[in-house]
């Protein structure tokens, strides 16, 4: 919770200083079209520049390691599993924002299926319909659709 409060304070401070700018009207439409076009045919969105690994290992991992996680999948798996247990027989609904091709979400669903957890529904969302089409195929191929 302390880390979340730090993040919120940081964002608020940047907004107050005018460094956070919202896009309006046609600028926003151009950005959305550009984003959709850029990822229309990108199957492996995890093929990131080398700097990502450096940044993740040196800056992100030290933030999450004290909580017992070494990656985002472990984080989501643990807390979705706890939520699913808490809901009992009711459906535990999770929404994934900006999920792209849904590799993480499909992997999580496979893990829950393997553990016999059958009351989790993960709803993937993304602005890019091409990525969501690939996600549907992936989920069907892995029998978690």
Image (cartoon, rainbow, N blue to C red):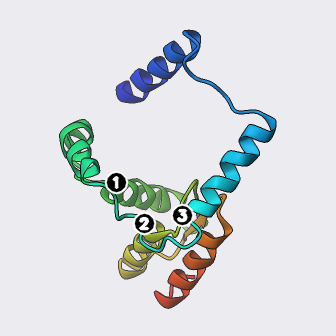
Residue 130: quarter of image: bottom right
Read off the residue under disc 1: 72
In the image, 84: left or right of 16?
left
Q: Give the mark, 1 or 3, whose residue is nearer the N terminus.
A: 1
Depicted 62 relative to depicted 12: above or below: below
Q: Under tag 3, what secondary structure?
A: loop
Count of marks overlaid on the render: 3
Q: Nearer the viewer, residue 30 or 120?
A: 30
Q: Secondary structure at mark 1?
A: helix
Residue 128 percent coordinates (x, y): 64, 63
Seen at 45% across and 58% down, the residue is: 80
Residues at circles 1 and 2 in contact by the CB criterion of under 8 Å: yes
**Residue density around tag 2, few if under 14, some if 14–19, many if 20 or more, within 10 Å:** some
Q: For the point 59% across and 69% down, which residue is it?
A: 40
Is residue 126 in sight in this rendering? no
Q: Mark 3 and mark 2 in contact (Cβ < 8 Å)?
A: no
Q: Which residue is mark 2?
A: 104
């Amino acid at each position: 919770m302390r880390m979340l409060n730090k993040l919120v304070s940081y964002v608020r401070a940047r907004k107050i200083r005018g460094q956070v700018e919202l896009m309006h009207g046609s600028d926003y439409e151009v950005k959305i079209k550009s984003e959709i076009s850029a990822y229309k045919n990108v199957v492996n969105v995890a093929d990131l520049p080398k700097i990502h690994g450096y940044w993740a290992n040196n800056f992100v991992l030290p933030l999450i390691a004290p909580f017992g996680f070494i990656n985002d999948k472990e984080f989501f798996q643990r807390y979705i599993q706890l939520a699913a247990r808490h809901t009992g027989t009711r459906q535990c609904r999770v929404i994934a924002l900006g999920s792209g091709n849904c590799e993480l979400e499909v992997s999580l669903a496979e893990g829950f299926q393997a553990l016999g957890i059958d009351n989790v529904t993960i709803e993937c969302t993304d602005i890019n319909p091409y990525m969501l089409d690939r996600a549907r195929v992936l989920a069907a191929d892995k029998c978690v659709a």
